[in-house]
Amino acid sequence: MYSSLFIYSCLAVCMLTFVFTIYLSQLFVRSATEEIQTSDREKIQQVVQTSEFTLQKLRQFALRVYSEENIALWLNMGSGDYSPLSLYKAAASVREFVSSEPFVQSICLFNFNLNQIYSSSETSLYSPQDFYDPSMLKNIESKGTTPYLQFFDHSVNGNSYLALVVPASGPNRNFNGYVSILFSKPLLNEHMLQISEQDQNIMIVEGPNKTYLLGNAETDLVSKVANAKKPASDSSQWELASGEGTWSVQTASLPIEGWQIYHLSPYSECRAKIVRIRMDIIASSVVLVLAILLFLFWQSYRRLKPISDLTARLQSKLGPKESIANPAYAGNEIDWLDSGFERLVERLEQLDLSLKSSKALIKEDLIKQWILGSKSSGPAEQYIREQTAILRTGTFRIAVIRLESYGRFTEYYDFTSRKLLRYALGNMMAEVLENHGFSAETIDFGSDHIVALIASSASIETEARILNAMEDVRVQIRRWLKLELQAAVSSELDDGADLQPVYEEIYELTLLAFLCEEDRVFTRADSDRYRPGEGSDPDERLLEQVIQAVRLRDANALAADLDRLTRHMQGLSYEECKLQLTHIIYSMMKSFKNGKTFQGMKSIHVFLDRFSTIGEVKTWLLQELLLIMDQQRQRSGSNRKEECVAEMMDYVRNHLHDPRLSVDDVAEHVNISVNYARQLFKAHYQLSLSDYITDQRIKYAIHLLTTTDWTVAEITEQSGFQTKSTFFSLFKRATGMTPGQYRLETAKK
């Protein structure tokens, strides 16, 4: 097996490496060539831009020289008004111009009225007969330059310069004063053409008559470039062969000057480097192939024989039922092993998932039991200590986050979506607390809030950190889930604390945001903030009648009861009246938390400041209560009924541990009457609500009997039964056996 695999692997590796090497080398050659050409094009374009800018700057410089006041005065001076002082001033101006422009070699002033020539290089005054540069004099007097102030090549005493004459001369010139300026070619090569001594590239600037003006090329190469057959496009790339090798030529033009710029790169040298790198790639690929082949040979010999041995051992254990000769595997050992391991991994994953799910459910159930009961005891306490970090620091705290405007939340999302969002709230709360250094367990009771048990120490510093962490919980949930929350945190508790009253108190604290102007995390110290003053208690009987009228959808009774409830407020002071209104609105909020009445309110006190009279408040409150009645009437259809039933079932499953769980609690949770809750549940589930609670408790007890080794007394407590006799009676009625008998029968199976 390993020989055939090695041979096939060798062929595959060689073919793939060969194709990849050829492709990589060709890609490198093409990329390198394109990179060189792109670099040459960018270089010549940069030279063109620099040349245009520099030459235009030099023209402006020449015009400034010609138009300078002292120089212009001397150039236009006649024999009748000649003054030596004017020559002195003109010479001083010339020296300043020469020193200000590094490209300038010399400046000469010609005055043919006076037959005088001043040269800055000699700092002397000449006559036309004894001037040291007769070719420039002849150029100005007879030949002249083009009328566009164009530069031209000029030699003096064996040195070559780029010259410019101002003003431009022509056949009909009418000037007696001229300025000639000679510019240094080495400086222009260095700064305008950007030529350096280390640069292997060649730059050639060719004049209108193929005159070599600037550059760093030899005479023979200049001649070959001038006489070479060039492409039609000035911007195209072409090649030139010479005795020194092959050159890649890029061409550009300067239209104003009528110049051609040639950029020559030693293509033969670049090609030689490319060939060397290409050979290096091929050689490296050969070495890589040899190394891979050796590795494949070693691996095929070392790995496949143990696989065959393993297959033989597994075959002997599994027997003929799982034979490798099965047509499904066609005698392939690898496929046979792969199939067996896949089945094994699938079973392990299912077992692990089942175990994790069971642990999570047990942990959540025990924590709910602890919060809703009086104290965790027995195996429940031991499990909480071992599987969570709540009790490891000695003390802990209860934190509650409550959704604002829960009525709007229930309208926007159906029952399933609400459960998913509450699940996300719990996860985000635990993660943010962990980021702040606190271990926490979150529990969803299926309502408008999430409860967290946070392990913490009893110190002022820890309390401040927890408050900061809970504020961060609100910020992160508002940022990512776009939900507004109110939060509250208890003081430190120990494992002997009665958690249910603490949990209820902390939940009530989250409602304080509706009574004050502060938007923050509340603590138990804030529980005394809302205390009605003397004489500010409203008639609770009338208030209950108003709430009952809304639930019964009796609009006439609602208006009359609300009028009687607010009639006596006209005799109160403003503060007492406002306090009673706050209490009434707060009571409505608690009674109709599923409505839209108070959505968006941050503070009831601030909201009441919008009204100027009690009558306005009463009118607004009546309209809002009538709107709640309409909403309840609209939501009484079949979809709402099914959602209520699902929410009742979910509430029961989440509160099975509470021995005080009753039909009244379930009805209050879904905001309907007790009789209607019984009727609705019976119609949809064909089972009474109380029987459903008992049935769920029996099922949970069966689950504990078959998955744990807890005593029957402990299971009785965990299942929410108030007495052991009640549990035995109901269990035997449902299963026909006692809990002990059921456990024994299940163990035999």
Image (cartoon, helix red, strand yellow):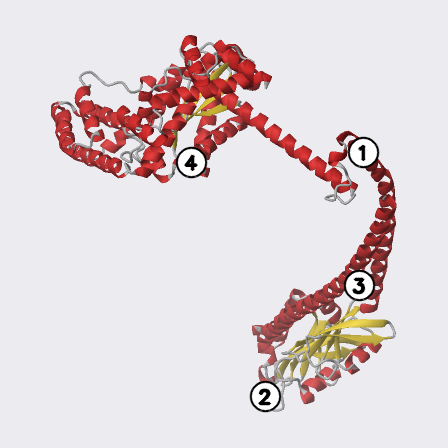
Horizontal side of 336 relative to 452 (left or right) equals right
Label 4 to label 1: alpha-carbon separation: 50 Å
Say if mark 2 contacts mark 3, CB within 8 Å.
no
The residue under label 4 is 416
Marks 2/3: CA–CA distance: 46 Å
Give the residue type at disc 1.
Answer: Leu
Which mark, residue 310? 1
- Whether pointer 2 and pointer 1 mark residues with C-beta atoms closer than 8 Å, the reply is no
Give residue 143's quadrant in the image: bottom right
Mark 3 vs 4, N-terminal side? 3
Q: Is residue 194 visible?
A: no
Tell me which numbered mark, 3 or 1, is placed earlier along the sequence: 3
Q: Residue furthest bottom?
A: 172
- Picture layout, residue 296 above or below residue 317: below
User: SS for tag 3?
Assistant: loop
For the residue carrying disc 3, how many other residues have a C-alpha within 10 Å: few (<14), some (14-19), or many (20+)? few
